[in-house]
């Protein structure tokens, strides 16, 4: 197909990020945006190139009914995904749905069932879940190294994110777990997706410890204090006996690298450090502590780094290629479901003080 016309549903910070990436890719153009808030619509229009004709709508249904789009990117608040995607799937348009897929496993399964029910509307429709951390250059290199056997069989995956608190959103919707799915769904679905991708396996058990200790403690919304966790450890077990761990702290902006991903097997260890953009490789019998191979990773094909080290740019290149039939969808609804399920199981583990089997939340 020729130029792919995009509609952006939700033009807050991340919606604008998607517009800025689409602007940099030949053969893609934003033709419509929608957002119920005027300020967000104004920001979305401002991000579009001068001279482009872009229609702005208050509702997603108006955008879908406009006939202006071949594909949409859904970037509305987490709790609206089920409603917005119901309409999108019935429209037959290609869709990139931002993470998390939904705020619960139940809603995610509803979307998968609806996608199957509406398949005949457009049998060629592509559905891509926006777990773009896969495409950060250093992380992508780590994933490729592990797949090529750099560590042997990956036995342990450790992901550490030490970062700043949640940002302010329109209406402060992200201050409450009922809107986000909870921190371990909202923020950490990316990391649980990476664990599954690296291990090439689905997990069977989760054990977590976490709390709301520091952030947003003085905020008050109609008598309610935010309930989102700001720190946690999550251990994810796989049926093969391998394991992964997440170390999350959201009051740790006084740090050098925000994310560190390490994979260890019988042959050695590979690490990716962000935003440093470095890969460290150690081979057992060849390297020792303090003496490993260090490589700065970059991708000259990335025309817009944006907020996520160029990963959204790569994501859009590949999503467009899938729409054109040049490749398969790489991040599926099943991937989205499992990334939510692990986060939901982690929250349940914290609440109940016990390990939680994935079969409990997936049933």
Image: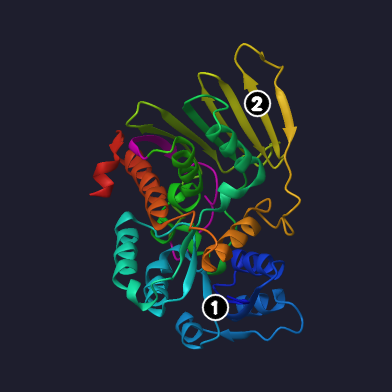
Which of 89 and 223 lies nearest the eye of the viewer? Answer: 89
| Residue at image location 66% in from the left, 68% down from the top | 22
Which of 147 and 260 lies nearest the eye of the viewer? Answer: 147
Residue 117 seen in render: yes
Farthest residue in the top direction? 285
The circle on residue 35 is 1
Residue 222 is situated, as x and y percent measured from the top left of the image, at: 45, 66
Q: In this view, does 116 lie above or below 332?
A: below
| Residue at image location 33% in from the left, 39% down from the top | 349
In this picture, residue 209 sits left or right of residue 272: left
Query: Is 16 colored magenta in this rendering?
Result: no
N-terminal of the pair, mark 2 or mark 1, is 1
Identify residue for label 2. Answer: 281
Mark 2 or 1: in front is: 2
| Residue at image location 40% in from the left, 76% down from the top | 122
Secondary structure of the residue carrying numbered label 2: strand
Q: In this view, does 354 lie above or below 336?
A: above
User: Which region is colored magenta?
Assistant: 202-223
The circle on residue 70 is none
Query: Is 211 colored magenta in this rendering?
Result: yes
Residue 165 seen in render: no
């Amino acid at each position: 197909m020729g130029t792919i016309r995009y509609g952006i549903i939700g033009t807050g910070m991340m919606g604008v990020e998607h517009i800025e990436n689409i602007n940099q890719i030949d053969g893609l153009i934003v033709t419509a945006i929608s957002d119920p808030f005027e300020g967000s619509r104004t920001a979305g229009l401002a991000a579009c190139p001068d001279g482009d004709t872009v229609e702005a709508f208050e509702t997603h249904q108006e955008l879908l009914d406009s006939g202006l789009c071949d594909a949409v990117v859904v970037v509305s608040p987490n709790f609206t995904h089920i409603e917005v995607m119901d309409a999108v799937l019935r429209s037959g348009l290609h869709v990139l749905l931002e993470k998390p897929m939904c705020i619960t496993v139940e809603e995610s399964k509803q979307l998968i069932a609806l996608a199957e029910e509406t398949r005949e509307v457009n049998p060629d429709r592509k559905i891509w879940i926006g777990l773009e951390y896969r495409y950060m250059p250093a992380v992508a290199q780590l994933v490729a190294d592990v797949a090529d056997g750099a560590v042997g069989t990956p036995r342990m995956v450790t992901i550490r994110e030490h970062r700043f608190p949640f940002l302010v959103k329109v209406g402060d919707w992200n201050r409450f777990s009922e809107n986000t799915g909870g921190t371990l769904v909202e923020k950490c679905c990316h990391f649980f997706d990476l664990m599954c991708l690296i291990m090439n396996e689905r997990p069977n058990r989760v054990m977590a410890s976490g709390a709301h200790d520091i952030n947003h403690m003085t905020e008050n919304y109609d008598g309610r204090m935010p309930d989102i966790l700001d720190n946690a450890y999550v251990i994810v077990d796989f049926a093969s006996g391998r394991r992964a761990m997440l170390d999350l702290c959201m009051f740790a902006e006084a740090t050098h690298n925000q994310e560190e991903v390490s994979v260890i097997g019988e042959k050695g260890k590979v690490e990716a450090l962000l935003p440093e953009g470095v890969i460290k490789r150690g081979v057992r019998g060849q390297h020792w502590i303090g003496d490993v191979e260090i490589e700065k990773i970059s991708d000259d094909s990335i025309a817009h780094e944006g907020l996520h080290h160029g990963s959204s740019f790569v994501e859009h290149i590949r999503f467009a290629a899938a729409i054109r039939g040049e490749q398969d969808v790489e991040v599926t609804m099943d991937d989205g479901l499992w990334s939510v399920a692990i986060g939901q199981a982690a929250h349940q583990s914290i609440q109940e003080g016990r390990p939680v089997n994935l079969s409990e939340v997936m049933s």
